[in-house]
Amino acid sequence: MKMGTALIYDEEMTNYKLLWVDPACKIEVPERLTVSHEALVKSGLAERCISIPVREATDADILLVHSEEYLDAVKKTPYMTLEDLKEFTLQYGDVYFHPNIFHCAKLAAGAALQLVDSVMTGKVRNGMALVRPPGHHSMRSAASGFCVFNNVAIAARYAKQKYGVKRVLIVDWDIHHGQGVQYSFEDDPSVLYFSWHRFEHQKFWPHLRESDFDSVGKDKGAGFNINVPWNKVGMQNGDYLSVFCHLLLPVAYEFCPDLVLVCAGFDSAIGDPEGEMCASPDIFAHLTHLLMNLAGGKLCAVLEGGYNLTSLPQSVCQTVQTLLGDPAPRPANLNGPCKSALESLHCVRSTHRQYWSCLKHAADLPACDISTKRMKLAEEEEKTQDKGEEEKSAEEKVWPEPPKRVTPTIRTAVVFPDGVACPDGCKPFRSTEDLDPLTVSKLKENFLKDADDSDALSTLSSLIALVEKMEKNEICSGLALVHDVSMATMCVVQHAAAALTNRVLVVCVGDGKVPSHVTEDGKTFVVQFSNKESEEQECKYYIPVHLKKGFSDVSGFIQALFSLVLPLGYEYDPGLVLLVRMPDSGLSESVWQHLTGLLQGLAQGHTLVLMQEGEKSCVGPTASSLLGDAASSLGQLLAPQPEHVESLESLRHRLKADWKLLQTTAEEMGRGDEF
């Protein structure tokens, strides 16, 4: 992976704390920062990053978002007595001040700006800033929710002003609504703000009506503010992934940002006393990976919340390790979305379909009896008496430590014919060990018409050996140019089904023959994009995706990727992904790059790409994606062809009973609300 990952941290930002008793603020402690940084150091991740020094934000930087009156007021806090600080704090909500907090707040905002500078100038590809105080709640003239200056909002305005960035995507996965960011950009179509947050029909802080799904922005900014309210606690990995696949990613790709900023709050992870959610820390590896092909990989994550001192550092490490380019872990405990999550997803998609072409097919708003908007607060009152017990259970929640992510020494191996140059960063691979005689006999019997075809036997032997190395995690990914891609596909699938313990996901682009007949036992799952109607019998593990107007409809293909392929892939959870490019598939290199990059979030990155020998022009882009480089931009996407949307939705509806991550409405039924 080219360039590197920045890590911005300064111990000075731990040098303030709550100086009086305040139950609402007691969880915002200096240890939040120290345990996060110590975990990165202990795991060896910190030394792999490029350390960037922190600078203070200037007055001019801060005034990009905040008023002069507010800045002048905060400037006085270092000179206030304890009683004055208490009095000053009372005018704001759920925040505290300390004599050193103004200095730390300038460092926090400045750290975000240093990260933007490093990414935009190409010094690094991406990075994370560990900062304190957080920022996403602070407003133009008010501190709020532990936040003094709005670090990410300042960074967005700074990037637009200094680097001429046209479009900024802000993804706020903190468990609280970042109302300060929303207010900053609600009339600005150049900034797309996405937030999911605990809402519980306005019962949860900050208790704002404008945190609900129907607050979409104002004037020219209408549609560029996306709120996903969580109306129940206990959301799991599948709920988070569903919202990414069916809402955020399609809209983000249509928007086509030049820069991605993440309000990286980890109070949305399991065990957090504020969030009370059940998403495991490893899910942040996947959320990060899914964003890394946007904006040419220019991604800046800035710490926000996170108050469980175990899940917080675990989640930070998962995020940073993914930014470094390491393959994501196998997703843990992946269920379909719950009913409440589907209600919220349904409402948001329906509300935003007038603004985004990718959502035009979304279902109508649900009837009022299940609407997240119209639920009466009175119906929630009975839960108040159980609040103490819920908080206690959240604090006592136990979960396994994320497994260590071991990156193979070889990132990408290639099996190429003689005379084809090996791409930089890849390693040539040929089987050096003789296959057992039985395997050789089967290869000759099943695939080789000419018994003397030693080149074909050598290639197939190398593919089998490569797959076995990938299963042992000695090699992460592979790329092979073969004489007969259909034969090579059949060979790999048959060997994998017979010899490997893991399942194989085959994603095939083009009209060639694929092994649809070997999928009945579930060890192989085939998704085939084709220009032609399939003659094979459709079953749970063979999904033909017919593109009536071919692969020229980029928007239609991308929609299929997010609405079908990724949800199916995550739910199936393969140990190997076999990506097949048939001859004359017609898929553009840039779209192919995005497909290759996104699929590497599955199977710990174990992806084997098979292509026909004649497709040498596609070798470079494919190898680049397998090595972890971001795909080239697709540009702002147009509306997909209506015929494609209709066929994709028809297919999704047929499959959703078997594959729960394909569901997008509560009527399609989730796993229930049993938490």
Image (cartoon, rainbow, N blue to C red):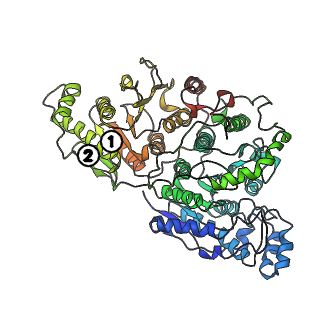
**Circle number at residue 267:** none
Measure the C-alpha gap from mark 1 to mark 2.
8 Å
Q: Given the current orientation, which residue lies at the most extreme left position?
A: 452
Taking depth in this image into account, of 546 and 336 the one nearest to the observer is 336
Label 2: which secondary element: loop
Q: Does the CB distance between marks 1 and 2 fall below 8 Å?
A: yes
Camera-nearest residue between 240 and 260: 240
List x then y, in percent, for residue 445: 19, 25
Residue 605 x, y percent position in the rendering:
42, 47
For residue 643, what is the image quadrant? top right
Q: Is residue 16 above or below residue 178?
A: below
Which residue lies at the image location 71% right of the left edge and 50% below the top edge?
A: 390
The residue singled out by tag 1 in the image is: 616
Q: Does residue 492 appear left or right of residue 341 in this picture? A: left
Label located before the other in sequence (1 or 2): 2
Q: Is residue 549 above or below residue 535?
A: below
Is residue 43 shown left or right of residue 389?
left
Q: Amino acid at mark 2?
A: Val
Q: Is residue 44 above or below residue 246?
A: below
Provide residue 660's location: percent of width, then percent of height.
57, 32
Q: Residues within 10 Å of mark 1 (few under 14, many from 20)?
A: few
Crowding at dot 2, Cα within 10 Å, few <14 / some 14-19 / many 20+, comes out as few
Badge 1 amino acid: Lys
Question: Which residue in the protein does label 2 denote?
Answer: 420
Local secondary structure at mark 1: helix
Is residue 218 visible from the viewing direction of this image? no
Quarter of the image for residue 148 reads bottom right
